[in-house]
Image: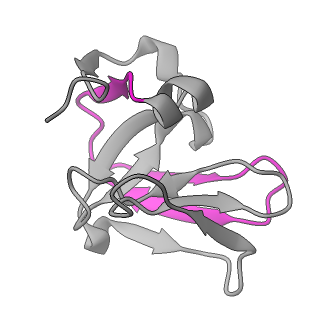
Amino acid sequence: MPSYAGGCHCGAVRFEVTGTIDEVEACNCSICAKTGYLHWEVEPAAFRLLTPEPPIRCYQFGSMTSKNLFCQRCGVSAFRHSRSRPDLVDVNVRCLDDVDAESLPVAHFDGRGWE
């Protein structure tokens, strides 16, 4: 099983994720459209936070279900817990080291019209 390292822009948040990236998802909801988040959802057992005390903050809005996590130093959201699948870790593929996100198959999710 492939393993990927990733993190925020400044390096204060680092993680490792294991799995095969078959497809990623682009969402058109207000936060994903503005941040350019490219989703890959994995089971929590496939995700490992490497930084012991990362400077992570959480932003919630609307239903307050999603946990939009971001580095308090650089502002980058490398992973989060989505409203649609809060039990999974939603990795921002754009934050994975040495992964060409533009070459991956992309499914589109209508987050704007969801519900």
* Left-right relation of 60 to 3: right
Pick out the residue farthest to the bottom.
52
Q: Position of residue 72 (x, y in %)?
A: 79, 64
Q: Position of residue 80 (x, y in %)?
A: 46, 58
**Quadrant holding the C terminus:** top left
User: In the figure, 34 relative to 58: above or below?
Assistant: above
Rendered residue at 50%/60% (across/down): 60
Q: Name the residue nearer the viewer: 72 or 45.
A: 72
* Left-right relation of 23 to 6: left
Q: Is residue 1 visible?
A: no
Rendered residue at 83%/52% (across/down): 74
Rendered residue at 70%/65% (across/down): 13
User: In the figure, 113 relative to 95: above or below?
Assistant: above
Pick out the residue farthest to the front.
62
Q: Name the residue nearer the viewer: 87 or 110.
A: 110
Q: Name the residue nearer the viewer: 110 or 15.
A: 110
* Left-right relation of 44 to 8: left
* Left-right relation of 20 to 15: left
Q: Which residues are magenta?
A: 1-29
Q: Is residue 76 visible?
A: yes
76 in the magenta segment: no
28 in the magenta segment: yes
For residue 111, what is the image quadrant? Answer: top left
User: In the figure, 1 relative to 73: above or below?
Assistant: above
Q: Position of residue 54 (x, y in %)?
A: 71, 77
Q: Name the residue nearer the viewer: 8 or 65.
A: 65
